[in-house]
Image (cartoon, grey):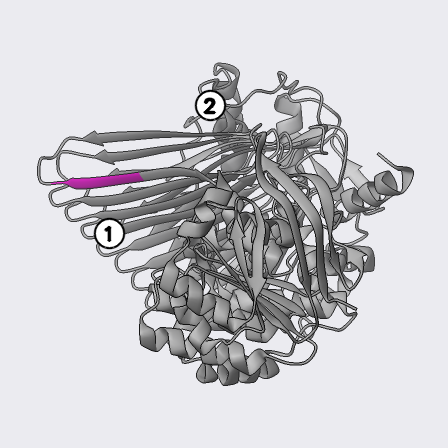
Amino acid sequence: MALIEIRNLHASVDGKDILKGVDLVIEPGKVHALMGPNGTGKSTLSNIIAGRDGYTITDGDILLNGQSLLEMEPQDRALAGIFLSFQYPVEIPGVATSTFLKAAINARRRAAGEGEIDAMEFLKLVKAKAKELGVRDDMLKRPVNVGFSGGEKKRAEVLQMALMTPRFAILDETDSGLDIDALKVVADGVNALRSPDRSFLVITHYQRLLSYIVPDVVHVFAGGRIVRTGGPELAEELEAKGYADYTGAAA
Amino acid sequence: MAATDSTAQTVKELERYKYGFETNIETELAPKGLNEDIIRFISAKKEEPEWLLEWRLKAYRQWLTMTEPTWANVRYPAIDFQDAHYYAAPRQKIAPKSLEEVDPELLRTYEKLGIPLREQEALAGVAVDAVFDSVSVATTYKKRLEEMGVIFCAISEAVKKYPDLVRKYLGSVVPPGDNFYACLNSAVFTDGSFVYVPKGLRCPMELSTYFRINEKNTGQFERTLIVCDDGAYVSYLEGCTAPQRDENQLHAAVVELVALDDAEIKYSTVQNWYPGDAEGKGGIYNFVTKRAACRGRNSKVMWTQVETGSAVTWKYPSCILQGENSVGEFYSVAITNNHQQADTGTKMIHIGKNTRSKIISKGISAGHSDQTYRGLVRIQPGADGARNFTQCDSLLIGDQCGAHTVPYIETKNPTARTEHEATASRISEDQLFYCLQRGLNPEDAVGLIVNGFCKEVLQTLPMEFAVEAQKLVAISLEGSVG
C-alpha cells in the first residue's frame, strides 16, 4: 500500500484557489522531489498535509497508510508520523532547543503510552544525533532558532527530524539559505534517515540539492497541481531549461 | 457540545484549580462585621499588649475617614465590609507548642497542598510558616534557625517575644494611613510572618510562608515584617491558595521589608489564590500593599512575583531606595485568564545617591481578562547618578483580552538616567503551528511559549520553586487556546 496518497486535492485561501487537483502517490521507502516555480502552491501543499489552519479543502483527500488525515489535528498528524521541515523555522524566544526537543519526544512517548524520557537518556540521545549532524552543543542550549544562521536553522530541523523518526517527512526548501558545505551536511543527515519504511517529499527550486539527496521520482508542480512526473533525469532537464515551459500552465 | 465533551470539560475545570478543596475543621469565628469591639476581640485573642491595640484602633478610626481607591483599572461590585468575619481560627484545645501537637487535619491539609510540615518530610533547606485563615498553625525548623540567631515566627508570637523589634519596625515602611487597604489591614491584621536576620548572617535556609484561606465569609489580613540587619541576607517565599467558592473573598495584606547597610532581601511570591470560575464567578480580591525600605548603604531588595490567581489583583511591590548605592529590583510574571483582572506593577523611589533599580514585567492576558502594568519611577532631587531600567512586555492570547501599560516617570535630578522599553505581542500562529507540528498539544505549546516569554523572571525564583512556577504558568492558561 502507498504510504502517502493524495487524491484530487483542491484547496483555497481566502476564496482564492491555490491547489487545483493534486494527485500524488508515494510508496514506502521512496524519495520524491517536488520542483517548480515560486508561488505555485508547493508550500501550501506541505502546510495542508501537516494540517495548518487557514486553508479550505474544497475537494479530494490525503491518506496516510490508507487513513484520511483531513479530520486530524496537526499534533495528531505529527504523532502519526508526519514531519515538516520548515522553509523558515520560527523563533521561540526563551525556550532552550533541548527543552523543546524533550517536549516533542515526550509528546510521542505519551502518545505511545510510555513514561517521560529519563534526563540522562535524553542527553545521550540528543548529543549523539547532534554530533552526527554537526549541531554544536551550545546550539542545544540556545533558544529555538533564535539567532541561528540559515545553516544552523536547517541543521536544527534535520536534527528534529532525526529525533522524531517520522514515517513521512516533507523538506520544504531545505536548501534555501544554505552554502554548499551546509547543504552537504544536511543532505547526509537526510540520507542517513532513508529507510525502507520511511518516505520523503523534497520540495526544492533547484536541482542542486537533488545531487546530494537523489530522488526516486521527480514531479514538476505548476499552477496548483503536478504537471509532469519522471525520474531523476527530469531534475537535470529542469536545471538546464528552467520552468519556462510550465509557467504557461500556471495561467 | 457533545455530552462527553462537556463531562471532560467539567473534569478539567476541577483539575485546573487543584487547591480548591475545603478543610473540615471546627473554627472559631469573630461575629460578622467591623467595629472597635471586633478589633478589641482580635487583639484579645492574640493576647496583645496595650500599645498594639491602641495602634489598631487609631488605624481603624483613620480608615473610617478614608474612601476606597478607584484609580485602578479594575471593576468589581462594592465590597460590604460589614459582611465578613475578621477573625477565623481553627479551634485547638491547647496552643500547640511543637509540630507534634498540631491538629493532624491541618497537617493533612498542608500535605495536600504540597507543603509537608513534618520536618523529616519537608523540603530540606526550606523553613515554612503555615498560616491558616487568621492564625499561624505551625512553623518548621524554628529551633535550628533560632540557634543561628534568625527569628522566624508568626507575627503574633513576635509581638509577645520580641516587642521591641516589632514596635520599632511595624508600620515604619507602610504607615497605617498609607492607603485604604493598608489602613484596614493595620486595624484588623491577624497573622503573618516575622523575620529578623542578625548582623552579618546569610540565612542558609529559604524561609517561606504558606497562606491558606479556608473559612467562608472571611477576609484574610496578613501582616508580614522582614528585617535584615547590617550585612545580612535572606531569601523568603510566600505561597497562597484558597478553596473554590462562588463568593468573593477579600485578602488585604501588608508586607514590609527593611534592609539595613549591605543587607539583601530576596522576596518571592507565587500567588495562586482561587481565580474564580470560567464565567468570572467567585475568586479572591487580592488588594495588597508591599513595600521595601532599602535604608542602608549598598542594601538590596529583589521582588519576584508570579501572579496567576485571584479574581482581582491590585498590587505594587515597591522599593524606597534611601541608602546610597542601594538597589531595587522587581521581576514580575502576571497571568490573567477567563475574567480575571489585574492592575499590578511597582514603584521605585530613588532618594539616595547612585541608587539603581530594574523592573522586568511580563504580563500575559488570555480569555476575557484585563491586565494593566502600572509602574512609577521617581528620582528625587538628591539622587545623583540614579539609574533605572524598565522593561514591560505584554503577551496576548486570543482577541477578547486586554493589556495596558501605564508607566509614570518623574525625574527631579538631571544626572539620573531612566530607560523604559515596552512591547506588546501575540503568540504567533507560526510559533503555535511549529510546536503542534512537532507533536505538542495546543496547551503544552502555549505553556512552553509562555514559559519562554517569562524565562527572565522565572529564573530569578529560588530553584526549589522555579519548576513549580513553570507548571503553574502552564496550568493557568489551560483552556485559553483551541
Position of residue A72 measured from the top left corner of the image (x, y, whole percent): 74, 51
Quarter of the view holding residue B346: top left
In this rendering, position of residue B174 left or right of residue B114: left
Q: Is residue B294 above or below residue B263?
A: above
Q: Is residue B3 visible?
A: yes
Could you say which is closer to the camera, residue B291 or residue A198? A198
Query: At x 48% / y 16%, what residue is drawn?
Result: B66
Q: Is residue A205 above or below residue A155?
A: above
Could you say which is closer to the camera, residue B26 or residue B78? B78
Q: Secondary structure at mark 1?
A: loop
> Is A197 inside the magenta-drawn segment?
no
Q: Label 2: few (<14), some or many (≥20) within 10 Å?
A: some
- Which residue, given by chain and number where applicable, does mark 2 sit on? B72
Query: At x 69% / y 22%, what residue is drawn?
Result: B33
Of marks 2 and 1, the one in the foreground = 2
> Is B419 inside the magenta-drawn segment?
yes
- Magenta-drawn segment: B416-421
Query: At x 44% / y 46%, what residue is drawn?
Result: A247
Q: Is residue A135 above or below residue A145?
A: below
Position of residue B1 measured from the top left corner of the image (x, y, whole percent): 84, 34
- Name the amino acid, label 2: Ala
Query: At x 40% / y 50%, what residue is drawn?
Result: A244
Position of residue B403 measured from the top left corner of the image (x, y, whole percent): 47, 31
Q: Secondary structure at mark 2?
A: loop
- Name the amino acid, label 1: Ser
Q: Chain of mark 1?
A: B
Q: Is residue B125 visible?
A: no
In the rendered structure, find residue B326 and report the number of the disc placed on it.
1
Provide the major secondary structure of the magenta segment. Answer: strand
